[in-house]
Image (cartoon, rainbow, N blue to C red):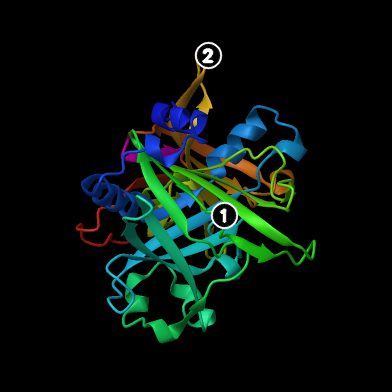
Amino acid sequence: MRHAGMIMGLIALTTGPAQATNSPIELRTAMVALIERLSGQFDSAPQVEAQAALGTPEKERHGRVYRSFTRIDAPALGDNVLVATVRYGGKAGQFDNGEFQVWTVAVDAERKAVRMSPRRFKDPDKYKDRALDAAAFAGLAPSDLVPASGAASCDIYWRLYGQDLRGASDLAACKSMSTATKTELAWDWQYVLSDSELWLTFAGRDASGKIASGRADQAFWRLGKARAFECLFGYRPKDGEPQSINGPHMHDRGDVHVWQTKAPNARTFHYELLRADWPARTGRGTEDLLRIRIYDGDPTMPQSRTLLGEGWASAASDRASFGDGEFNGRCKLFDPGAPPPKNE
């Protein structure tokens, strides 16, 4: 079920800062919560799946977006620093160089908000392949960075409303020239963050306030926060030796693992792990479930894929599995303190 506090936050999105909790101690608490909630991986695969299942018209659907925020130790930049990435189409999708950013987080007492300020890498190619590895940024210094520019170059001001954190840009200060319209646009970014979801929308507005870039309906992208799982996959061909692979890591918001088996039964399988709100079996409302599937063919290309097996579990479960003798799969919530798996 969708986070009730988030819905109330969206209803009151235009409410001014005076309605937020913003005393000094509350702002420090909000900053800690912001860093904790943002740290991790987010994917809009659940929204994409829901819109397809509900028959949302193609032109109204949201594209799939993956975002990550990795907290790093960079004392030369500040006490609280995050490295952010954006990919289109999922974790293995197109990398957005413009949103590969370093965010510093601090309390802004004058604005009574938690301020996130972006900068970019002077040499992004040096880091982008290890963007989720905090150790890759050891020793990061101001000289490694340049000012952010463009639509995603604005400070974001966060405040706590009930259980939800809401962030927004300052329209008066968040401006840049649009390469598409060749005019200056004011960028309106809006975020809503709960323990389990990150919602966001943006608009580039011209001098009259009309949206020149962004969705006309300003409907939010809804990204689910991911959990890390460790998996075991097996294939028992009818005319050959069984094969297995133990230890792949996947997140549960639509991550895909591609497994190439060995000759003489060489095949390419795609395993998908997805936690989302699905139509309830009662026919009323939705229920939060975890699904594991195996496809012959890329699961992101429905016309070329064949479903070979699937299993379901409660979203609160720490594992999901399936097996039919020929194909099997099992994913369990990853425990960083556990010993590495053995090949079976």
Q: Residue furthest bottom?
A: 143
- In screen coordinates, is 89 left or right of 57? left
Which label's residue is closer to the chain start, 2 or 1? 1
Q: Position of residue 96 (x, y in %)?
A: 60, 66
| Magenta segment boundaries in residue numbering | 317-324
Which mark is on residue 90?
1
- Nearest the viewer among 195 and 8 is 8
Which mark is on residue 284?
2
Q: Is residue 35 above or below residue 85?
A: above
Q: Position of residue 124 (x, y in %)?
A: 52, 79
Tell me if I can see residue 116 in this picture.
yes
Q: Crowdedness of circle 1 by 10 Å Cα count: few (<14), some, many (20+)?
A: many
Q: Residue furthest front?
A: 110
- Nearest the viewer among 255 and 149 is 149
Callout 1 secondary element: loop
- In screen coordinates, is 243 left or right of 80? right
Distance, label 2 to label 1, CA atoms, is 30 Å
Q: Position of residue 319 (x, y in %)?
A: 34, 40
Q: Crowdedness of circle 2 by 10 Å Cα count: few (<14), some, many (20+)?
A: few
Instruction: Count all numbered tags in the image, as a single digit.
Output: 2
Q: Which residue is rendered at x = 45% and y = 33% of the image?
A: 9
Tell me if I can see residue 238 in this picture.
no
Q: Is residue 287 magenta?
A: no
- In screen coordinates, is 285 left or right of 300? left
**Amino acid under label 2?**
Arg
Quarter where residue 174 is shown: bottom right
Which mark is on residue 220?
none
Q: Which residue is rendered at x = 40% and y = 82% of the image?
A: 142
Q: Which residue is rendered at x = 34% and y = 57% of the image?
A: 108
* Image quadrant containing the N terminus: top left
Callout 2 secondary element: loop
- Nearest the viewer among 43 and 215 is 215
